[in-house]
Image (spheres, helix red, strand yellow):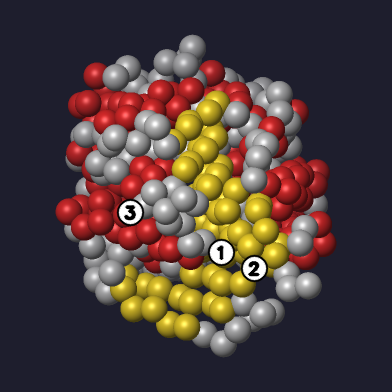
Amino acid sequence: MTTATAGLSTRPVIDAGRWPDLTARRAKVRRAVEGAIARRIFLSVARRLPVRIQLGREAIVGGAATDPTAPLMVIERPESFFAALGAGGLIGFGESYMTGDWNADDLGGLLEVFAAQMGTLVPEPLQKLRAFYVARAPHTDKNTTTNARNNIARHYDLSNDMFATFLDGTLSYSSALFEGAEDVGRPVRDEVVTTSVPSSAPTWSLLPDAQRRKIDRMLDSVGVGEGSRVLEIGTGWGELAIRAASRGARVLSVTLSSEQQALARERIAAAGHADSVDVELLDYRLVEGQFDAVVSVEMIEAVGHEYWGEYFRKIDSVLAPGGKVAVQAITMPHDRMQATKYTYTWINKYIFPGGFLPSTEAIIDVNRGQTSLRVTERLSFGQHYAETLRLWDERFIAALDRVHALGFDEVFDRMWHFYLEYSRAGFRSGYLDVQQLVLQRKAA
């Protein structure tokens, strides 16, 4: 599936003040050695994958070199590309796309091939040396109560208007749930597991209803209705709080984004629910009170693995007797989660500082070990996220003039496009999933 990229600059002008790491240069000898090693490893990987790689004016190589339908990666400046890859690994891979060292008409399709082989891209002998060559996250990215607000602000406070260029009218920045077939599988560890795939490739006009469907399913799963006391961890721009309040619930929604708080309050007031919804700029660890339902949509990804126990213990402590919890979480395979737990990634550096995806097993185990909560239901709908991201990316590319008018440059265009397609590739390949999990206290 190809995402149109008309208007996306293939040779962006790089502002060194805004993007210092994209213009930094390493010592000539070190750069040459790192580049040579990276070239050898990359081409070795490419030869066993169904892709085509065009190195400047050299012949096309790759495991599908003669297949015109295979994704094509055009490396415009091989020396710069391999130097970036050698110096920064997967961070360098993303940075070299940002600078225009390489391009792909079907970026999502190309990245999907890589994502499907994520666990084996790096040769096994080098994987054993992972701790010695992968970057570590800066101490400031650790989600302490001091750092967490800054980490959130670096993403969510970019600009409400920028997010509005590609989100639908609900301003929901999480996976939608389109019409699709659901398959209820056999219970796993006392939980009911359901999977869902979209019935067709959805169009933009279907996205708002799909976002509301996602929210309503969560609210239904925890019994939100007239008089319910609801805690929302991670406000977004207020759509869930609005829909909960429309059912007669009283909502406390907490966020660390001042931009989101301001706009959410405006939207909630415009919907007529200012008296029943409080949106507070507050760390989830500082919440007090008792709630009949706790809901959190794609917020656990920003918690940090060191704090998952604290996150669920706080939820456990504020949940009223008989209450339920609904968490929508992006998940990754447990073995890859363990292998990458301390890795600093391109996504951490440029998109979500301090973020890390849990596995389903990690969520289940942390609750079994540290809380009275147990997962009782799970809905898996990763392919819905792939379609959500496709629609967002198409909308973003179509709105580049508006993005530029807000002060964002051509490097940002490529960074955001890479982020959306990189994420979409993860879900399309099955490497990533998104799940709605329902938790309640274990029976006495």
The kind of residue on which mark 3 rests is Gln
Q: Secondary structure at mark 2?
A: strand
Image-quadrant location for residue 281: top right
Q: CA distance from mark 1 to mark 3?
A: 17 Å
- Mark 2 highlights which residue? 375
Give the residue at mark 1. 437
| Residue at x-position 33% and y-position 60% | 213
Q: Where is residue 216 shown, x and y percent of the image?
A: 38, 59
Residue 104 visible? The answer is no
Above or below, 125 relative to 277: below
Number of other residues with Cα within 10 Å of mark 1, as a class: few under 14, some 14 to 19, many 20 or more: many
Mark 1–mark 2 CB contact (< 8 Å): yes
Locate residue 343 relative to residue 12 in the image: left or right.
right
- Taking the image as shown, residue 95 lies to the left or right of residue 207, namely right
Left/right placement of residue 411 relative to residue 140 reads: left
Choose between 390 and 188: the one closer to the eye.
Answer: 188
Q: In this orientation, which residue lies closer to the viewer: 174 or 3?
A: 174
Q: Of callouts 2 and 3, which one flags the residue occurring earlier in the amino acid sequence?
A: 3
Res. 169 image quadrant: top left
| 289 to 223, vertically: above or below | above
Q: Is residue 191 above or below residue 352?
A: below
State the separation of the CA atoms marked 2 and 3.
23 Å
